Image (cartoon, rainbow, N blue to C red):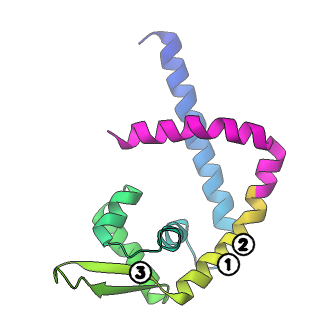
Amino acid sequence: MTDSSNSLAVTLFSEILTSDQLVRNRLSRVLPKGMEISHFSVLNHLARSGEERSPAQLAKTFHVTRGAMTNTLNRLELSGYIHIRPDWDDARRKMVAISPAGTLARDTALNAITPMVHALIGDMGEDKVRAALPILRELRLRLAGD
């Protein structure tokens, strides 16, 4: 790699990491009390998919260890936001579904996040955001492929 491409790589990842940290800080401030970003992410995924998932599937989806996902799921279950049941086909596995309380918590969180996201998009302009999405998506897919 040339010095120019090294500089480009460092600048790209510096921007991504800094943006990630800033988004996480903003989200943490607007999420309902006691809800973490990981909780919202799992609830949102289950609500959008409309299907049960195994803890292993969720860990793979979120690129975290099974232990980290188990911790998140335990907290969500204690809050009454998810139901965890044995897999009827394989008793060694479990299946996770969002509960009505979890759907309400996810919707409440989404309503809290939406004004912040709309303001950010409004400040940047929808055209710029739409133009950035394919690049960010491609970057995510390439990184996920490793």
Answer yes or no: is residue 47 visible: yes
**Residue 95 x, y percent position in the rendering:** 31, 79
Camera-nearest residue between 71 and 111 = 111
Predominant SS along the magenta part: helix
Badges 2 and 1: C-beta atoms under 8 Å apart? yes
Residue at image x 37%, y 79%? 96
Measured in 3D between alpha carbons, the distance from the residue under mark 3 to the one under mark 1, in whole angstroms, is 18 Å
Q: Which residue is mark 2?
A: 111
Marking on residue 85: none
Residue at image x 64%, y 58%? 25
The three-letter amino acid code for the residue at tag 1 is: Thr
Q: Which residue is mark 1?
A: 108
Judged from the image, the secondary structure of the residue bearing numbered disc 3 is strand
Q: Residues within 10 Å of mark 2 (few under 14, many from 20)?
A: some
Front tag of 2 and 3: 3
The three-letter amino acid code for the residue at tag 3 is: Ala
The relative height of residue 89 versus residue 17 in the rendered view (above or below) is below
**Residue 133 x, y percent position in the rendering:** 61, 41
